[in-house]
Image (tube, grey):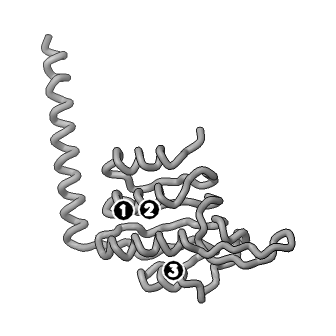
Amino acid sequence: MKITDEGINAIANSLHNLHSLDVSFCARVAIAAVLNLIKVRHQSLVELRLQHCSQLDIVRDFRQVDRQINRREGVDGLSILNVLRACGQKSNLCLLDLRSCGGHNQTYANYPENEPFVRGMHLLSFEQKLGGFFVRPLRWDLEIQQQLVDQIMTDDLALEQVKEPLKLIRIC
């Protein structure tokens, strides 16, 4: 199965309690869908894996390829950074895997520390553990605690509603 932007957008708009998504190696995933996913699910999404998504231009790459300069500017990385900044403290994203995306083909080499994307990620408390693999501590505050309590209460109510028809079936 091949995941496309339409699939990512459907996931973002339908799965309200999405915590983790791995679309690694999906060559058809473009930045617009990734940005929409982060915007729409920033409060629930904790982990996003985009390893080897070749359409994503994360960092600048001016290496020579076939006697021509590769002009990847890292625009997509800066777009992700801007969306995370806009979400601010409400974003629960703690793991962002961008290894070997477009603009960086060295799987284990860190993205350069002087890259605007990497510097911006550091300002958002992300640490680059491997080349393009960013993590930050899980945020825990009263708002998150309330979200969890509300979710448990909603799940309990839904479970009670499911049990009621089962009781009627057993009586009949």
Nearest to viewer (mark 1 / mark 3)? 1
Q: Position of residue 86 (x, y in %)?
A: 34, 73
Q: Amino acid at mark 1?
A: Lys
Please tell me the numbered disc located at residue 35: 2
Residue 158 to residue 71: above or below? above
Indicate the secondary structure of the residue bearing disc 1.
helix
Quarter of the image where the N terminus is located: top right
Q: Amino acid at mark 3?
A: Glu
Q: Label 2, label 3: how many angstroms apart (C-alpha)?
A: 20 Å
Q: Label 1, label 2: how many angstroms apart (C-alpha)?
A: 6 Å
Residue 24 to residue 83: above or below? above
Residue nearer the viewer, 92 or 155: 92
Please tell me the numbered disc located at residue 78: none
Can you tell which quarter of the image residue 43 is in?
Answer: bottom left
Q: Position of residue 172 (x, y in %)?
A: 14, 10
Residue assigned mark 3: 127
Would residue 9 be visible to someone looking at this image?
Answer: yes
Residue assigned mark 1: 39
